[in-house]
Image (spheres, grey):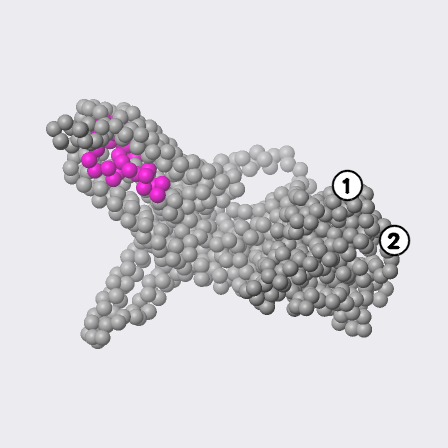
Amino acid sequence: MEKIGCTIDGNLDDSKFNEPIPWIGLYVVAASAACAIAMAIDAFHGFRYRKFWFPCKYFALNATTLTVIAVAVKLSVDLNTSMPRSHDQLAKLSSTVFMCIVISNSLPSLGNMSNKELMMNVVALGILVITVIVNICIQLGTGVIYVFFIEHVLVMFLMVVLFGIVLSSALAIPATKFYLDLKYDKKYKRAKQESINHANDSITQRLTDDLERYWVMAHTCNPQFVMGRLATCTASGAFCLLSALTLAEAMLRSYLMPRSFRFCVGESDYKWSSILILVTQAVAIGAGTIAPAMRWFTAIKFTCPKKASRACRVKRLWVEKYWIKKLHHLKETPLDLRIYSRQCRKLVHNTKNKVLVVCIWIQIAVVVSSKSVRLTSIYFVYLFLIFHQSCKKLVGSFRCTGTNPNFDAELDTNNSCKLDLSRYVLRLEGEEEIVDLMMGCDRDATGHWIRMGRKKQPRYLIQLLEKLSTSRGGFEGVYNFDSNQVPSLDLEEPPNSWALPVVTLTSIAVAVSNTDFRSVKELINCVHEGLIYIRIVENSLDIKRDLVNIRRTAQILWAEVELHYKWLDVELREMALQGKSPRDIISELSDIAKNKFSEYQKIDIIGCLRDSPSKWPGELLAANSMYRACQTLLLNMGHKSNECSKAMFERLTAMITDLIGACLTNLQHAISIKCHHSSIEEREEIVRMGILLLGKSEKILEILSCQPLPSSNPELLACINEWRALSKEKDPLSCDSIPTSSDSNFSTSPDLYLRIE
């Protein structure tokens, strides 16, 4: 019987070994196309939002992209497949150039990595670079690559330089983050003081000014922006452009001057797929060159500001401390060696110091070379800069002709009214000249995102909160939704959150409303929008994370109430349609909750009820909340058994409105805390979300500004239990009295209770 893989005489059958190679070529095409699309989207994103440092949003250096890149450069590491024709040899070169392009393109993404992640990705990239270079050298020696020798050598040199730039930049990242974090804390304190000094402004204006300051601070310390303006990153754009031009030169020579080459006759094992690889990678190289080249050109443009004649002035080349801080730290840190011989420890220690001294000098050389590339490049684009400025002046003169002088005066007035945000720009040492560049990149970002937020205002929630203006004030529902006179269920009471009482009261409202189902649906829409903002407040202000389980319980319960009108498998709408009075329905819900609690007590084998109440199972927390809310309602009803469902629904709606409104008075404080406590990598995105949130909640803040609050201290208003405790301090003789507008001692100044801390 003939063996699979062998011929009749028993020898190895290699006749089919090369058949799948064209399909492997398609695999390379797909990987190259994926990289091209990601780099093109990043370039488009940078142009669209005027982010001319071109952050890496889709094409970042990580395990996934490194795997895709390894597939895309397969031709560079393919040692024994013959590539005879011109497009085959060009495909080999394009794979090598492609490697240079992706290195330069992904440089800004290094800023968003932690130290450990940064080290792992740089090491992985280094292994890939070394593999590519070694394999190309082998192919040059064996004759697999037999043309474009100079081009391959030049591109390999550029690849080594670019990887050196990656290493140099990676060493500077920890120090830059440390410096910028310190500066951010100082600027944040200044921003808080500015907010206090303008306490008489309107709430929305004060919060807008604060967010503008936070945005400038967060934007200018964005790690990707910091990386994009470093000398090494901008210099990489020049090397990236040079590698792309090398491929373009080889392709033009190959197709326009074919007689200058002697290509072999024959067909590659990749067959038709090698042409697809060349075309796809040429497109990818073109798309990938845009972002690095623009970083390089932008750096050149702002190195010689205002006047092109200043481009010829050679500036001092110095190396800032953050470039070599990490290496100095490693040099000063002693090695923890378990070597008993003193001479051996001394030898290792001295060797380490000498190696690090060499590394420091190499780092200095790389930085100085990068700055030299930037300064030298000015001379090559000097004439273009003069032409560009002349065109701008010419266009400006045409625009000025016939312009209304009153319009210009109005424009100057508007500009003078704007905040001076240059004091809040976070810059590194040696970046004094590019403050204008950093200010100009996102000149109206705050206004843009606020306008975007205004288009998505929660109209149902605003309609609900507008009822506060006709109420007695004081957010009475915060105090009377849970009475201290309700007997506990023989256990320590769990802490209250803002969301869980809202969900519980809404569940009761759905159950007691037996007439107008339209009002129920409107209430559910209002509560759904309100819970989105409550979740934002609780996630920001629950710094100790004590209420995580309770908040999760509220979220799970709300999904059942909103989608299925159920509370712990209890059909709320069926209860409403049974024709019972509100008192009977509430009493039935109380009994169901109490029974569920008792059932859980019986099966509590592992003793989880003896844990902290905030860690109880969600079903238990929900049952306790429902029992206390129902018992409180029954106590407030007293002996009135004839209260109609409509009146009860309106009372529950008022409580829900008060709870949501009271929680949302913390919105400003939550935004401020979130902006300050977020990490440097996500700070810009958090501030952007805060600006969007301001646009969405402007009307809400205006409504709440008319309501009195029990304290001007935002720390006391963040927790619902603290809020309820303030009521008892105001009237210690009445545990459950409902404060009215006539006898309350609440602070009525709208400028005190929303101050950002």
Does residue 87 show up magenta in the picture?
A: yes
Residue shown at 31% from the left, 67% from the top: 331
Residue mark closest to the camera, 1 vs 2: 2
Query: The residue under label 1 is which amino acid type?
Result: Arg
Which of disc 2 and disc 1 is earlier in sequence? 1
Q: How many marks?
A: 2
Instruction: Name the spot of residue 608 as percent of width and height, x first.
Output: 57, 64
Residues 92 and 394: in front is 92
Q: Which residues are magenta?
A: 67-94
Residue 116 visible in the picture: yes
Q: Quadrant of residue 141?
A: top left
Q: Which residue corresponds to mark 2?
A: 642
Residue shown at 29% from the left, 69% from the top: 335
Disc 1 crowd, CA 10 A, few/some/many (<14, 14-19, 20+): few
Instruction: Name the spot of residue 55 as percent of width and height, x first.
Output: 46, 46
- Secondary structure category for the residue under label 1: helix
Magenta stretch: helix, strand or loop mostly:
helix
Q: Quadrant of residue 319?
A: bottom left
Residue shown at 49% from the left, 40% from the top: 45
Does residue 68 show up magenta in the picture?
A: yes
Residues 371 and 609: in front is 609
For marks 1 and 2, give the CA distance: 23 Å
Residue shown at 51% from the left, 42% from the top: 50
83 on left or right of 417: left
574 on left or right of 495: right
- In the displayed structure, 448 sits above or below 276; it is below
Q: Quadrant of the C terminus?
A: bottom right
680 on left or right of 351: right
Q: Which residue corresponds to mark 1?
A: 518
